[in-house]
Image (tube, rainbow, N blue to C red):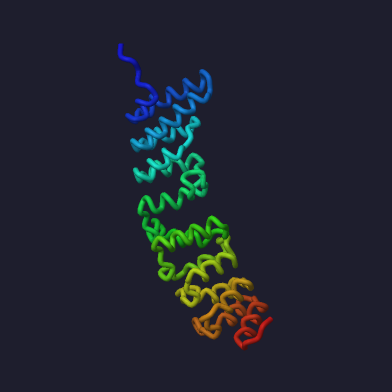
Amino acid sequence: MEAAPSLSQSCKSGDVDRVEAILKEQAARQGTDDDWQKELDDCLYDAIASSRRLVVGALLAHGAKLTDGSFAVLLNRQDIGVFEELVNHGFDVNTRDYMGQPPLRQVFHGFHAQPDLANDRGVTPLGTCAIHKVSPEMEQTIDLLLASGADISKEKRILHVAIRPTAYGGVAMLKLLLSRGADPSYQDPDTGTPLHYAASLGLAEEARVLAETEGVDLGAVVDGCTAADVARSRGHDEVAAMLEKLAKGEKN
């Protein structure tokens, strides 16, 4: 009688049902020891090398760990599905445990990702970053996108996105995007310039940052209104007064 395929053989062939059966049997019998852990890790290497996404998921769910060798194979294979499986099982894309650099950076370059490619809602990676809080990791991600070819000058509404009520970055994200070249004067058909938009929302600090940005025209008119006019029409009198003083060259 022919022997049943081993775990390694099943991983290479992609027999996920057999893999699951072996893993469950092993877990019920003795749990995990050093030899079993090594076998799991070696099998994860084989599954990644064979682009067996479902097998990768099964192994990770039962304790397999990614090694430098496995990660190097992942980069070489350029299998985004397998990478997604790792992320789905808690893989930290910002860790420096593998090859000394954040995996996100290595995968981004290794997979030749298109930094300006929008999703099905028309949002680019930079646009996605704009709604988040600023952190060292987020700043690194934005700089990585820009260094890899993302063009912030094409992101016409990115400052509007950063200060909208559902965003989390606030003044810090606004300053970061401005420092990276975002256009502070773009006039959105619905909300006007970023300054008009901030004024309409009563965002005093955001309005001040924009008003004090080089090249911003405090007298710019959208639908017959300056940003100060918009603020006052929405009941944000303090913001309006601040903008009017800045327009006169005064400082609060």
**Picture layout, residue 65 above or below residue 102:** above
Looking at the picture, how far across and down is residue 106, in whole percent? 43, 50
Looking at the picture, how far across and down is residue 129, in whole percent? 50, 59
- Number of dots carrying numbers: 0
Image quadrant occupied by the N terminus: top left
Image quadrant occupied by the C terminus: bottom right
Identify the residue shown where x is 43% and y is 62%. 147
Looking at the picture, how far across and down is residue 116, in whole percent? 39, 61
Q: Nearer the viewer, residue 160 or 184?
A: 184
Which residue reaches farthest front?
Answer: 100
Task: Report the side of 205 relative to 67 (left or right).
Answer: right
Which residue reaches farthest bottom?
Answer: 248
* Quadrant hosting residue 45: top left
Identify the residue shown where x is 63% and y is 73%. 204
Looking at the picture, how far across and down is residue 108, in whole percent? 41, 53
Which residue reaches farthest top?
Answer: 1
**Picture layout, residue 188 above or below residue 24:** below
**Picture layout, residue 96 above or below residue 2:** below
Identify the residue shown where x is 46% and y is 69%. 157
Task: Report the side of 198 relative to 145 (left or right).
Answer: right
